[in-house]
Amino acid sequence: MKLATLKDGTRDGVLVVVARNLARAAPAEAIAPTLQRALDDWTHCRPALKKLYEALNAGTAAGAFDLQPHRLAAPLPRAYQWLDGSAYLSHVERVRAARGATMPPGATEEPLMYQGGSDSMLGATDDVPVASEDWGIDLEGEVGVITGDVPMAASEAEAATCIRLLVLINDVSLRNLTAAELAKGFGFVNSKSWTAFSPVAVTPEELGEAWDGRTVHLPLEVQVNGARLGAPNAGEDMQFDFPRLIAHAARTRPLGAGTLVGSGTVSNQSRAAGFGCLAEKRAVETVESGKPQTPFLRHGDRVRIEMLDREGRSVFGAIDQKIIGRQTRKGGSP
């Protein structure tokens, strides 16, 4: 299934089912008014949503309409919890090497993870407001999962059964604010501003053989101003897969339905596929030539993140956003 949230002027929007080809949608509020409500009662709602999805793909769903991406909010416009890992160690290695730092102790044994703000998520085509270009504006192309309820101390096998949906993510990072925050010892706040999501969230079976129950074996295509930054394969070089990330987060507490868990920037050991963020490309440039040549994002720049299946069809739809100065974004929460 493919599920999305239609903007309707409320904070949580309204749940819709989206056709496999992303061209049409059908209202699902009779089943569950919001995606969060569907996740809260997944056992009951999933069969009814699947039936509606099948009808939509067959052209028989009542109330179906042409889908316009700009009308969609993030699948979860506000989430109970947003946890972002750093599962691709090649990303960590490159960024740290550029500043002469070694890998942290235990980096290959336990994932890095932080808890981000989740009260106001951006939709796939929403502008990204950043007050100052001096803050080092960067994108981060990621894959994420949305869980059902996860029990405390869940095993990796148990965690795998709790994955309900997958999404793409643009984790906006303000790189020039990062060092000062980390030096305080409490982690990210100001340097992790906005998080944006793909137009739709998909159930694991929608990915077919590309989903092995632990990660997604497809390239993540990342562009800046129409130019390719990279297309690293999300299924390669992922040191900590999604069941491992979920189990790590649930080690000392349960996770509620609707928890979002991100992979961190998708990155491959081989540089042939390019990069999922500007910081990693700048890090390689610094190591090779002493300083970066690639600038961070500026107001007016556009970023695009998308994943195509093996037949070249968009799976999640595209994150396609413009970086803007400080102003009230349109289509957001009241």
Image (cartoon, rainbow, N blue to C red):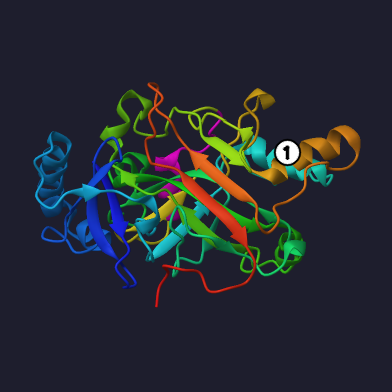
Principal secondary structure, stretch drawn in magenta: helix
User: Label 1 neighbourhood size at 10 Å, few (<14), some (14-19), many (20+)?
Assistant: many
Span colored in magenta = 237-249
Point out the residue furthest to the bottom here: 334
- Residue 302 x/y as whole percent: 60, 49
Q: Which residue is more in the foreground, 152 or 276? A: 276
Q: Quadrant of residue 308?
A: top left
- Residue 31 x/y as whole percent: 12, 58
Which residue type carries mark 1? Lys
Which residue is at 16% across, 42% downward? 53
Which residue is at 65% across, 67% downward? 325
Q: Residue 315 vs residue 38: left or right?
A: right
Q: In this picture, is 200 found above or below 206? A: below
Q: In which quarter of the image is the N terminus?
A: top left
Residue 103 in sight here: no
- In the rendered image, residue 79 lying in the magenta stretch gets the answer no
Q: Quadrant of residue 32?
A: bottom left
Count of number-bearing discs: 1
Q: In this picture, is 244 found above or below 63? A: above
Q: Residue 304 vs residue 298: left or right?
A: left
Which residue is at 23% across, 54% downward? 16
**Residue, disc 1:** 281
Q: Which residue is more in the foreground, 109 or 262? A: 262
